[in-house]
Image (cartoon, rainbow, N blue to C red):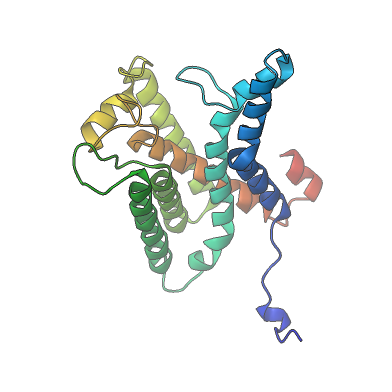
Amino acid sequence: MNHLSPTSERPPRLASLDALRGLDMLVILGLDALILLLASRAPGNGPLNTAAIQMTHAGWQGLRLYDLVFPVFVFIAGVSMSFSLSRHADEKTGPGPGLLKIWKRASLLVLLGMIVNGPLTWTEDMRYASVLGLIGLSCAMGGTCVLLLRRRKAIAAATGGILALVALLQFFGGDFTPSGSVNSWLDAHMLPGSLHGGTFDPEGPLCIISAAALCLGGWLTGSFLQDGRVPPVRRILL
């Protein structure tokens, strides 16, 4: 028998978010390898080879479908945060417990990311940046903004401010080359150890900051989805 009372049952999951998360994971857990394998067996198949190109990262310039997999994952984390942080935002004790939780998780993800990269030698050959570290730090930065600012308009303004800052740095702080971009300068001066891209790291400081804006965009989307004052059809259109 189920002895859970109605008030103790878990709230229903957001099916659309689960579907998007599943699709994103499907790409990186086998769909990409399957398409690449099929394309290698049929080199004369144009559509299949085009799909195979989309299942690889662009070297530097351009944008491919595979380049969107990780940003979508960060966006999904932001949407989930609109549910998980709501109870901390309402606590009488203030944002302290929520901040402690998200930064503890960020610290753990940074450590796990360094372990995944290789041995913890703590030398100049060790890579400190990682995908897990970027997820943890960007979500912690986004969660901090949410817990401290609280209001949707203020959080939207913070998101726009971060994106504007990144844009200004990109257009006025570098020349859009792997060695001359503002990312490269920041990675070389602020990131210890080796860099995944040689002169830059795709999980470097500026990438973490821009990912925090993407996480906040996910939070805003999740918050809007929960707004019962907006009719469902209008919610979908917006």
Residue 179 location (% of width, % of height) = 30, 18
Instruction: Name above or below for residue 110 compared with residue 61.
Output: below
Residue 208 location (% of width, % of height) = 39, 40
Identity of the residue drawn at 42% across and 26% down: 167
Identity of the residue drawn at 67% across and 56% down: 226
Identity of the residue drawn at 33% across and 20% down: 181
Q: Report which quarter residue 66 is drawn in.
A: top right
Q: Is residue 140 rendered to the left or right of residue 184?
A: right
Instruction: Name above or below for residue 68 compared with residue 173.
Output: below
As rendered, which of 121 and 153 lies closer to the eye? 121
Residue 57 location (% of width, % of height) = 52, 26
Q: Is residue 156 visible?
A: no
As rendered, which of 27 and 145 lies closer to the eye? 27
Q: Quadrant of the N terminus?
A: bottom right
As rendered, which of 150 and 19 lies closer to the eye? 19
Residue 52 location (% of width, % of height) = 63, 23
Q: Report which quarter residue 67 is drawn in.
A: top right
Instruction: Name above or below for residue 199 compared with residue 118.
Output: above
Identity of the residue drawn at 62% across and 27% down: 36
- The residue sitting at the right extreme is 233
Q: Quadrant of the C terminus?
A: top right
- The residue sitting at the front extreme is 41
